Image: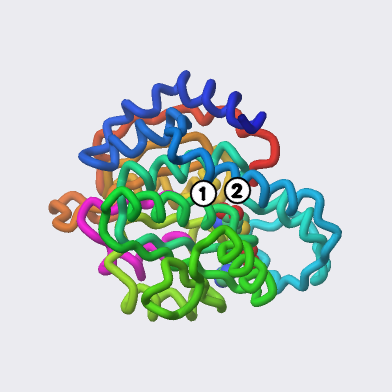
Amino acid sequence: MHPSILPLRAGLALLRVGQSGLPGRAGAALSRAASLRLQRAERPAEAAIDALRTRLRQSADTVEVVDYGAGTRGDKPPVRKVADIYRRAATGAAWGRFLFGLARELRPARVLELGTNLGVGAAHLAAALALNEADGGPETRLVTLEGAPALAALAAGHLARLGHGVSDDPECRVRVVVGPFAETLPGVAEAEGPFDLVFVDGHHEAGAALRYLDVLRPHLADGALIVLDDVEPGRPVREAFEQLRAEAPSAYAGKYGLLVHTAAPGPDSRREGAPAPAARESVPPPTSAGDA
Ligand SMILES: C[S@@+](CC[C@H](N)C(=O)[O-])C[C@H]1O[C@@H](n2cnc3c(N)ncnc32)[C@H](O)[C@@H]1O
């Protein structure tokens, strides 16, 4: 077991996050994800991702990165070490396992990720989708958006090496779309929605998160689960999450804020001035080493 799994498991158990009151399948998905447990058939896929993590951690390669300046810390050069990007920005092992569990239980047909980076979070999501299909579930699709072309190319390679077909071909499970979210998201949402699961893990600013969700709202399936990264106290996305909680059932799961989209919102559900619906607030657990 990856060493970061244990502290996260302890933190999530303390939170009793699985009993957060999220409705329907989202609640069941959160319970499954919070357990961080794997079934026997799931272990090979997660072991392959662990091997990818080891390669990235030890990589001596560099990559040119277009910096969108959002949620970054300090000045960073345009050419960076892959190992540094992995350490600073990629989803850590424990949180990757959490995403995997969410997607396994929720069984989404359409998944969207904002912020591909090196493809690590996408690898966990794609692994879950592949297993869901192998279990007899419907055809699935993961679309992941990345602004830095060289990162997108690296990620596509990582995902292909893990056995996920990556291209524009509808037969392929994964599609990596290159460009600023503001430019790519509207077309992707129109063409690829409605989404059942959305992972917002890029451009970590409150206004940006709210804008992206406004674009996405008409393209969300009823009961869709939205996972916002970086909602710890004091982080910019926390403010967006606090506003969004006024219009949707929600739960905190450590650094992730979860929201359930319902297709027919009631009259009180407008963002401004609306009272927050009943949703249990949790104190975030300590994040594990290596999580970004
Ligand atoms: C935290 S990393 C994503 C990590 C990844 N989701 C994972 O699970 O490993 C955020 C990524 O979003 C990209 N990004 C940030 N702002 C963006 C924007 N406005 N448009 C496109 N990509 C953006 C960055 O280049 C970076 O690779």
Of tags 1 and 2, the one toward the viewer is 2
Residue 204: tell me if it is visible: no
Q: Going 32% across and 26% down the picture, which residue do you hit?
A: 19
Q: Is residue 217 magenta?
A: yes
Q: Amino acid at mark 2?
A: Ala
Q: How many marks?
A: 2
The residue positioned 30% from the left and 55% from the top of the image is 271
For marks 1 and 2, the one nearer the N-term is 2
> Could you tell me the amino acid type at mark 1?
Asp
Of the pair 46 and 68, the residue shown nearer to us: 46
Give the colour scheme of this rendering. rainbow
Which residue is nearer to you in this view: 237 or 260?
A: 260
Q: Nearer the viewer, residue 289 or 241?
A: 289
Residue at image mark 2: 48
Q: Residue 155: where, in percent of width, then height?
A: 62, 65
For disc 1, the neighbor class at 10 Å (few under 14, some 14 to 19, many from 20) is many
Is ligand 1 closer than 8 angstroms to the Cβ of mark 1?
yes
| Residue ID for mark 1 | 229
Mark pair 1, 2: CA separation: 24 Å
Q: Residue at x 28, y 36 (%)?
A: 27
Q: Quadrant of residue 32?
A: top left
Q: Is residue 5 above or below residue 114?
A: above
Q: Residue furthest right?
A: 60
The picture places residue 81, in percent across and down from the top left corner, at: 82, 61
User: Does 41 appear in magenta?
Assistant: no
Magenta stretch bounds: 209-227
> Helix or strand or loop: what does disc 1 sit on?
loop
